[in-house]
Amino acid sequence: QRRKADWASKYASVEALRATFGVNRNGFWGDLDADRTRRLYKTLLPKALLELHAMGVQAQDLAPLAYRARVAAKLYARERSYVTLRIGSHMLDGIRTWQRYGQFDVTGMSYTQVWEKYAKAILEDADEDNESHAALREEDVTAQICLKILESSCRSNTMIDRLCLASGSHNSHHEDHDTTCLVPPHHCDDLN
C-alpha cells in the first residue's frame, strides 16, 4: 500500500506531474513537438503498476489508479505539447467519445465506460467459449476487467505512435529505455 501511495503521489494527477517534471515553459504555445510529446506520454504510462501487480497487488486495487495515471499522463503531455498538437489531440478524443457515447469529452472514455467496454468483451469471450454467464463468478469477472484496465492503461495507440514518433522511435526497445523527458525540467534544457 505504501508503494502504491508513493507512486500515486508523483504520477496520478496532472498537478503531481507538473511538480515532478515541470510546467510548460512556453505558455499557450507549448514546448514539445509531436515526437517528444509522444515519448513523454509513453514514458509516463503507469507500467510500474504492472510490476506491483506482479508482486501480488490485486488488479482491483490498481485499475482505478492506472486509469487516473493514464489520464493524467495524457493531459500533462498535451499541456506540454505545441498548441496545434494539443488542439488536434483534444479534437480526436472529443470526436471519438461523441461518436461512441454522445458526449464530447477531450479526456477520452470515463472509467465507467472503460469498465463497461471490458465487461462486454469478457462476456463475449465467454459466449465464444460456450461458457454460460451464470457459470462466471462475479469476483472472477471483476478481476478480469480490472486486469484488462490495468494492462490497457500501460499501452498506447500504435497508429498514433507511428504518426507522432520519429522513424523507429515506436519500437519496444526505444520505449522501454528512452527517459529523456523524465528528468526534472532543470535537467531538460534540450526540451525547449
Image: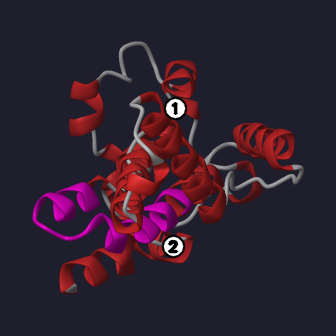
Percent of width and height locating residue 123: 50, 44
| First to last magenta residue range | 48-71
Position above or below: 157 against 114:
above
The total number of labels drawn is 2
Within the magenta stretch, is there residue 65?
A: yes
Q: Is residue 12 visible?
A: yes
Q: Is residue 156 visible?
A: no
Q: Which mark is residue 157?
A: 1
Which secondary structure, mark 1?
Answer: loop
Between 139 and 66, the one lying in front of the other is 139
- Residue lying at 56% horizontally and 59% vertically, measured from the top left: 71
Snapshot quadrant of residue 72: bottom right
- The image quadrant where one finds the N terminus is bottom left
Residue kind at label 1, given as amino acid type: Asn
Within the magenta stretch, is there residue 3?
A: no
Q: How is the image coloured?
A: secondary structure
Percent of width and height locating residue 20: 39, 71
Percent of width and height locating residue 128: 46, 28
The CA distance from mark 1 to mark 2 is 21 Å
- Residue lying at 58% horizontally and 32% vertically, measured from the top left: 34
Q: Which mark is residue 13?
A: 2
Residue kind at label 2, given as amino acid type: Ser
Mark in the foreground, 1 or 2: 1
Of the numbered discs 1 and 2, the one sitting upstream in the chain is: 2
- Residue lying at 50% horizontally and 19% vertically, measured from the top left: 162
